[in-house]
Every structure is written in C-alpha cells, then in structure tokens.
Image (cartoon, grey):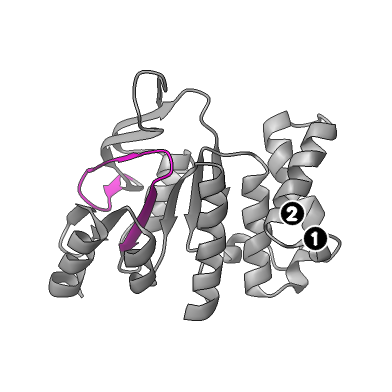
Amino acid sequence: MTMLNPEKIGPLLRARNLEIGYHGSRVVPPITFDLLPGQVTCIIGHNGSGKSTLLKSLLGLVPLHGGELELAEQTRIGYVPQREAMDPIYPIRVIDLIETGRYGLRGVGRKLNSEDKIKIDAAIDSTRITHLRRRLFRTLSGGEQQRCLLARALCTEPQILVLDEPTASMDESGAKETIEMTLSLAKTHHSAVLMVNHFIELVGKVSDQVVLLDRNKQRVFIGSPSTVIGIRNGDLF
C-alpha cells in the first residue's frame, strides 16, 4: 500500500484494479474506486460475492491478488466487524471492548492516558450507550452490540469508517435507526463511510456511491445508487 498526499489529492483511499480472493482464486474482476471525505459508499451483491473479502483486503486482513491501493497520509481507518465475529462466550465488558480501539493506537503494553479516556467517553456518549458501559457485551441485544462496536471504531477518530453488515439480523426499523446514527456521527467527523449492507432501499437513500459485486457473472458495477441499483433490479436478481 502506498500513501497519498492529502494536500495534493482529494481521495482518502484510491483503489486501482484490485484483485481479491482466497487461495490464489480471484472472486470477481478487478475493482477500481475512490473514497472521498464525507462520502458514503455501499457494497452490495449476492451472499458469497466477495463483499466481506473486499473489505478485509482493503484493511490488510486478506492479501490482495493484484492492483494498487493508496491511502492518504495520516488516514486512520475505523473497522466495525460483523457482530457474529465476536466471541459470544468471552466475558468482556462494554467499556473494556471499546478501550481496545485506543489500545490499537497506543500499541501493545502502553497504558491509556487522559486523552484516550476523553475520546472513549465521547464515543460512548455519542452512541448513547453510557448506561451499558459496565455490562457484559454478550448480554446485549443486537442493536446495542452494534452501537458498542461503532463506539470502539469512533474512539480512534477515523477518517474512514468501514462497516461489515452493520444491520445484519436486524429488522428494517432497527437497520434504519442504526444507519442513521452511524452516518450522523460520520458526518460530524467528516469521515468517509464504506459499508456492506443488504437493505437495498436503505442503500439507495443513504449512498453517494454503490459497488455491486456479481460473482456468478464475473462483473463489477460502480456508480451512483440510481444507476447501480437499477442494474441490480433489472439484471442480476
């Protein structure tokens, strides 16, 4: 991954001809797009189309098979994984979980300072989970868990907020509330948002850019919500 100079170029992240996949097998054709400050980009597609693989490749959790990935200097990425990725047995408290976001910035073995505590408290307040901070994460509802994971990402003060299926297992009402909170907080920090979401109507309302992955027909579409969702509705599903 190379670094962009934010004073000379607009995008926080630039992906050019990215090839993603596992074990030497490419999932979809090469992918090219930018993430701009304040922009909301949604990734849609069938199950198994490579949506989560794309996110993990951008985060460096899965190696790229090819292409170029450039990140603007001093850009931090906050990652909100799927709730199912959290160990349901491990007895971690909400406050301890959120603190791991700041430990990621400080480094292993270093204590959190007063600035860290301020950022953590601000993230907890903004996601309205103050009353949950001493609760065990595993005892919370799906929506409450999602807000805790969002707070962990926000306390790192990210310029790019990446969310993998933040509305999974939620009904449409819960999904709408979760997305509205997420985007409102991201807008406050002028962060770019990149998320996987399966509520297509909601995607159409909140997105500036949509990435549609079609593994079956080996195609990728990137563009405005009206254009890409129109292709999805008329051609793929």
| Mark closest to the chain's N terminus, 1 or 2 | 2
Please say if 87 is above or below 76.
Answer: below
* Res 212 quadrant in image: bottom left
* Res 130 quadrant in image: bottom right
Instruction: Give the residue number, with chain letter if any, for mark 1.
Output: 130
Q: In this view, does 16 lie to the left or right of 168?
A: left
Q: Do the residues labelled 1 and 2 touch (CB within 8 Å)?
A: yes
Q: Disc 2 residue type? A: Ile
Residue 81 seen in the figure: no
Q: Is residue 130 left or right of residue 186?
A: right
In the image, 72 versus 226, the foreground residue is 226
Residue at 63% from the left image edge and 46% from the top image edge: 154
Please say if 189 is above or below 48.
Answer: above
Q: In this view, does 25 lie to the left or right of 97?
A: left
Local secondary structure at mark 1: helix
Q: Is residue 74 left or right of residue 8?
A: right
Instruction: Please tell me the numbered disc located at residue 59.
Output: none
Q: In which quarter of the image is the C terminus?
A: bottom left
Q: Disc 1 residue type? A: Thr
Q: Give the range drawn in magenta.
A: 24-44
Instruction: Please tell me the numbered disc located at residue 124.
Output: 2
In the image, 136 versus 148, the foreground residue is 148
Residue at 55% from the left image edge and 67% from the top image edge: 178
Please say if 190 is above or below 72.
Answer: below
Indicate whether residue 28 is drawn in magenta. yes
Local secondary structure at mark 2: helix
In the image, 218 versus 170, the foreground residue is 170
Disc 1 to disc 2, C-alpha distance: 6 Å
